[in-house]
Image: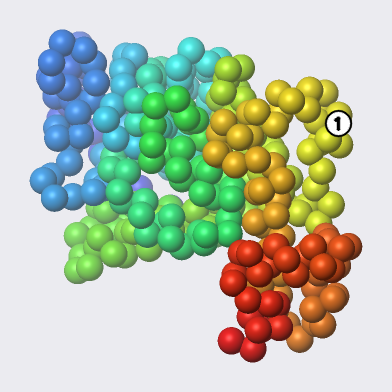
Amino acid sequence: MEQKLMERLRMVTEEERALLAGGGVERERYATGSGFTVDREKLLEKGKLITMRPHTRFTRFPRHSHNYVEIMYMCSGQTVHSVDGAPPLTLRQGELLFLNQHAVHSVERADLEDIGVNLIVLPQFFDLAFEMIGADNILGKFLIGSLRRGGEEISYLHFRVADALPVQNLMENLVWSLVNAQSNSRRINQTTMGLLFLQLLNYTADISLEKNAFSGNGIVLDVLREIEENYRTADLTAFARDRRFSLPYLSNAVHEATGRTFKELLREKRLTKAAELMCSTRLPVQDIITAVGYENTSYFYRIFRERYGMTPREYRRR
């Protein structure tokens, strides 16, 4: 990260000076009411959808929740987090931690060179990112949708992307933009977040998330990744056997998390890929049908017409 920006983020804040003098976390600075729910109205200016603040060092930040999506990015050093009773996770330099609204977590003491930034984000800020990942991207919709909805969805997403240069560049751009006020900042920041999600979808193998035994979100993410990466040959029965899950359990977990069956998700992915190939290549329709994993031509024509309201050849002409 650029030196001047790091120097600014490294500066000891007024709150941190008080902590070094022997004080503790002032709950009133963050929350209202009797509980410890960090309130977005305490941190966000009226009318804003996103803001940034350096993570508070020199003390353990106690167990709390919040009414917004929090994204933490480590610029240097590391921090240790406990989220919703899961085993502690270490967020290292260059890594990202997305925390769902309503997630309950605490952060162990960070020292001078453990420099992280917290992005305070309202769910509607992700609207443009949601559009940018595309309607055909099941995995991205699942991840962003989980962050936006809150409740009993994924509590956190931990992206181990320190070596992903495009992600690092986008995060530096986003942090710089939030530190330095500029014209059109909302649109710039929303677009940067969309580009960030598009890049993160290339690193789904580097995601860690809460393995909640009741929601099954961890294995569902693996299933969605299988559809995205191996849509031509993806088979839930074989997947369940290889991962030693029962097929009914896995089917129910996918349906509960996405609202659709595995077969429906796979068909949607194959059809959108076929439509993409029709627009971007000159491959014969029959070759495209084979390329996306279908052998029965008449079945493909039927489901394609149901999805797009026309035949593949008509779709290509248009």
Q: Is residue 206 above or below residue 192?
A: above
Q: Position of residue 103 (x, y in %)?
A: 39, 24
**Can you tell which quarter of the image residue 41 is in?**
top left
Considering every residue shown, the one lying at the far bottom of the view is 317
Is 167 in front, or is 129?
A: 129
Q: Nearer the viewer, residue 242 or 66?
A: 242
Q: Give the position of the C terminus as an image quadrant.
A: bottom right
Q: Residue 88 location, x and y as percent?
A: 52, 17
Q: Report the residue at 78% width, 27% height from top.
A: 247
Task: Locate residue 172: give its quadrant.
Answer: bottom left
Q: Locate residue 11 relative to residue 90 in the image: left or right.
A: left
Q: Is residue 120 visible?
A: yes
Residue drawn 39% across the image and 32% down it: 150
Residue 113 in the image: above or below residue 244: below
Q: Secondary structure at mark 1?
A: helix
Whether residue 280 sits left or right of residue 190 in the image: it is: right
Q: Position of residue 110 (x, y in %)?
A: 38, 24
Q: Locate residue 4, reporting x and y percent.
A: 32, 54
Q: Quadrant of residue 115?
A: top left
Provide the residue designation for mark 1. 242
Report the front residue among 174 and 131: 131
Q: Specify the amino acid type for callout 1.
A: Asp
- Please say which color scheme the image uses: rainbow
Residue shown at 22% from the left, 68% from the top: 184
| 22 sits to left or right of 74 | left
Crowding near the residue tagged with mark 1, few <14, some 14–19, many ≥20 C-alpha atoms within 10 Å: few
Q: Is residue 156 above or below residue 270?
A: above
Q: Can residue 111 be seen by looking at this rendering?
A: no
Answer left or right for 192 relative to 314: left
